[in-house]
Amino acid sequence: MGPGDRVRYVAIGDSHTEGVGDGDDVLGVRGWADRLAERMAATGARVEYANLAIRGRLSAQVRAEQLAPALALEPTVATVFAGVNDVIRSGYDADKVIGDLEAMFAALTGAGARVATLTFPDIARVAPLTRPLVPRVLDFNERIRAAADRHGVVVADVAKHEISTDRRLWATDRLHCTPLGHARISGALASALELPGADGSWSDPLPAAPRPGALLTVAEEVRWLGAFLGPWAMRRLRGRSSGDGRVAKRPEPLPVEVG
């Protein structure tokens, strides 16, 4: 990828790909996929970019709702990241979720796209109360690596790097990234895709930060339970999703301007 190359990048997935945590719903969210498209354009390539991701979507919904439109756009590059919403739910079926992801890998690579995906960090180091989910996350990542290998999909293996669980990369809901986190993920993908100018600096540690005391840590967990985990659980009980009524923010491939 370089000066004069024509690139059509299509991103599919859930809130992480949509960009939640990087911006807001008034002025709009940005996110790692937007940032990755900008990195592609910075190589001098002529980049068109579409983002079909919608928050709250499960892997089966991403496959059913976004794969066909993505294929119709004839991407040369695609990113697929979904399954985290499945992992954190009680009815999680690993075989089904990975089956959905592998089907998307197969379809997009079969159509000639260069496809990239991510692994998910150890969420217990970000939200300690989620520790029971760690075996699922570790298994999910291993299955993603294997499925990606079967289809020639590039993996930005962020889970293997210490920086991935630095709290400063995570929003207060502990599920989505801050702007800094989204920037680091775009760097990881740029490096995995071997974009000109990309390197491993995305994984460099941040300056040391003071460690909170035990009382402050407990208080933070209590606040998180009330402000985020509780409302999330209530939506599940009511059969609602944060993505209800939403549409893709960038359904058509539009040119990406640099600077």
Image (cartoon, rainbow, N blue to C red):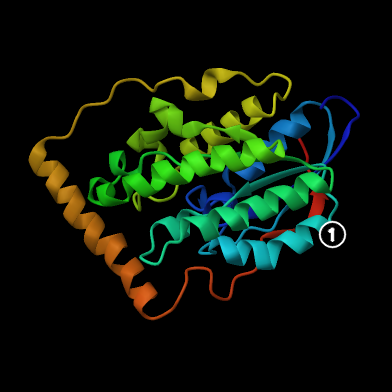
Q: Residue at x 38, y 63 (%)?
A: 89
Q: Residue at x 78, y 26 (%)?
A: 43
Q: Would you name the residue on which mark 1 appears?
A: 72
Residue 147 vertical placement versus 162 (above, below)? below
Q: Nearer the viewer, residue 97 or 195?
A: 97
The C terminus sits in image quarter: top right
- The location of residue 98, given as percent across then percent down, is 55, 53
Drawn side of residue 78 relative to residue 186, left or right: right
**In front: 132, or 176?**
132
Tell me the element at label 1.
helix
Percent of width and height locating residue 81: 58, 49
- Please rate how many residues cluster around mark 1, counting C-alpha atoms within 10 Å: few if below 14, some from 14 to 19, many from 20: few
| Residue occupying the far left of the picture | 215
Which quadrant is the N terminus positioned in? Answer: top right
As displayed, is residue 137 above or below residue 58? above
* Type of the residue with mark 1: Ala
Instruction: Name the residue at 61% across, 18% down.
Output: 199
| In the rendered image, the vertical position of residue 80 relative to residue 36, given as above or below | below
Residue 57 figure quarter: bottom right
User: Do we see residue 107 in this rendering?
Assistant: yes
